Image (spheres, rainbow, N blue to C red):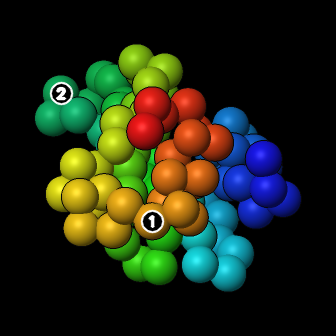
């Protein structure tokens, strides 16, 4: 795993927004309509394109299929694999 991917995974684990070079993590807690619960997720971007979302409550990473189909590059695959996605 590359240094940037380790930092990306660390940011997700610490529930923090982070950006370095071409990769960005945006941590977004959202209060639900009943204001009793909070849905937490982190969106991952590569070159400004949303490549996937980590959902904390389900402890899973969801790949954005639209972006992946447009840019199935080695870098995109590497970032997704670092997050546990099967690509």
User: Looking at the picture, does residue 83 appear above or below residue 28?
Assistant: above
Q: Quadrant of the C terminus?
A: top left
Quarter-wise, where is residue 12 in the image? top right
How busy is the neighbourhood of tag 1: few (under 14 within 10 Å), some, or many (20 plus)?
Answer: few
Above or below, comparing residue 59 to residue 43 in the picture? above
- Determine the residue positioned at 51% across, 46% down: 80
- The label number, if any, that marks residue 34 in the structure image: 2
SS class of the residue under badge 1?
Answer: loop
> Tag 2, which secondary structure?
loop
Residue 45 shows in this picture: no
Q: Is residue 59 left or right of residue 20?
A: left
User: How far across and down, in percent of the image, does residue 67 sit?
Assistant: 27, 62
**Residue under pointer 1:** 73
Numbered label tally: 2
Q: Residue at x 63, y 42 (%)?
A: 82
**Residue 64: x, y in percent?**
28, 50
């Amino acid at each position: 795993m590359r240094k940037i991917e380790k930092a990306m995974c660390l940011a997700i684990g610490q529930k923090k927004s982070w950006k370095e070079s071409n990769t960005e993590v945006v941590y977004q807690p959202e209060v639900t309509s009943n204001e009793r619960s909070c849905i937490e997720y982190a969106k991952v971007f590569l070159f400004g394109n949303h490549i996937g979302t980590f959902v904390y409550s389900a402890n899973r990473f969801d790949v954005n299929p639209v972006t992946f189909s447009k840019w199935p590059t080695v870098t995109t695959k590497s970032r997704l694999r670092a997050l546990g996605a099967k690509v």
